[in-house]
Amino acid sequence: METTFVHTDRETPSQLRAGGSTTATSQPELSRKIAALSDLTAQQLRTEWRRLYRCQSPRLSRDLLIRNIAYRMQELAYGGLSKATQRRFIALTKELQKSGSIASDPGPRVRPGSRLVREWRGRTHTVVVAEDGFEYAGKPYSSLSKIAQAITGAHWSGPRFFGLNRSKAPGVQSELNASDAVGEGEPGNG
């Protein structure tokens, strides 16, 4: 059984998302179309690429053509990357072009001297941010995750445990305020 998706009418991306003839109207139909890609010849895949991307296909392996076409089908059916993610990729691309590398994201930052307070199982835990790490219970620690593990006995994301991420952990209480925190994900009272 040979399946092809060549269509003579040319839909716009908004028509495709609205349920045009070339996109799936349901998850099972989209899954079926994506599965059928593996039965197409290389020429049929290139034709499908031109239809979906509106340009000539690059010289890619068959496997990469299938993966990219499947991504595009899903993108047209469900929407693509958020504007914020697109802006982040553009910024990272510019950084890579300018410096030749991308600095790793250090995550949320707090100034030395700030105190992070977390209540855990009825006990209040206070961490002091130091120049070269953190101090908890009179001991130096290199990361908040190690402190969170010392407190809970389980592996936690330290920034999340102490409410430094947007999706902060439940029960977080913090003494940080806007002048203490630098960067995004300032904790609030929880």
Image: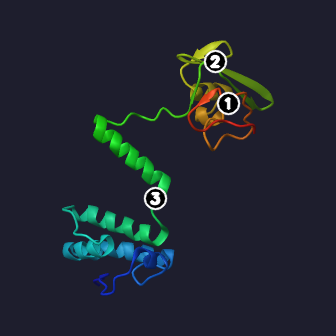
Between the C-alphas of marks 2 and 1, the distance is 24 Å
Q: Secondary structure at mark 1?
A: helix
Q: Where's residue 183, x and y in %? A: 56, 34
Q: Please tell me which of labels 2 and 3 falls first in the chain.
A: 3
Residue 95 against residue 53 in the figure, above or below: above
- Residue appearing at x 44%, y 47% in the figure: 88
Could you tell me if residue 156 is visible in this image? no
Report the front residue among 57 and 68.
57
Q: Please tell me which of labels 2 and 1 falls first in the chain.
A: 2
Q: Secondary structure at mark 2?
A: loop
Between the C-alphas of marks 3 and 1, the distance is 36 Å
Could you tell me if residue 58 is visible in this image? yes
Q: Where's residue 190, x and y in %? A: 75, 39
Task: Return the residue at label 1.
Answer: 152
For badge 1, the amino acid type reads: Thr
Task: Return the residue at label 2.
Answer: 113
Report the front residue among 29 and 126.
126
Between disc 3 and disc 1, the foreground one is 3
User: Residue furthest toward the bottom?
Assistant: 8
For badge 3, the amino acid type reads: Leu
For badge 2, the amino acid type reads: Gly
Q: Is residue 69 left or right of residue 116?
A: left
Q: Is residue 51 left or right of residue 126?
A: left
Residue 51 occupies which quadrant of the picture? bottom left
Residue 59 against residue 86 in the figure, above or below: below
Q: Secondary structure at mark 3?
A: loop
Q: Which mark is residue 81?
A: 3
Between disc 2 and disc 1, the foreground one is 2
Q: Please tell me which of labels 3 and 1 falls first in the chain.
A: 3
Quadrant where the N terminus sits is bottom left
Q: Are marks 3 and 1 in contact (CB under 8 Å)?
A: no
- Residue appearing at x 74%, y 31% in the figure: 120
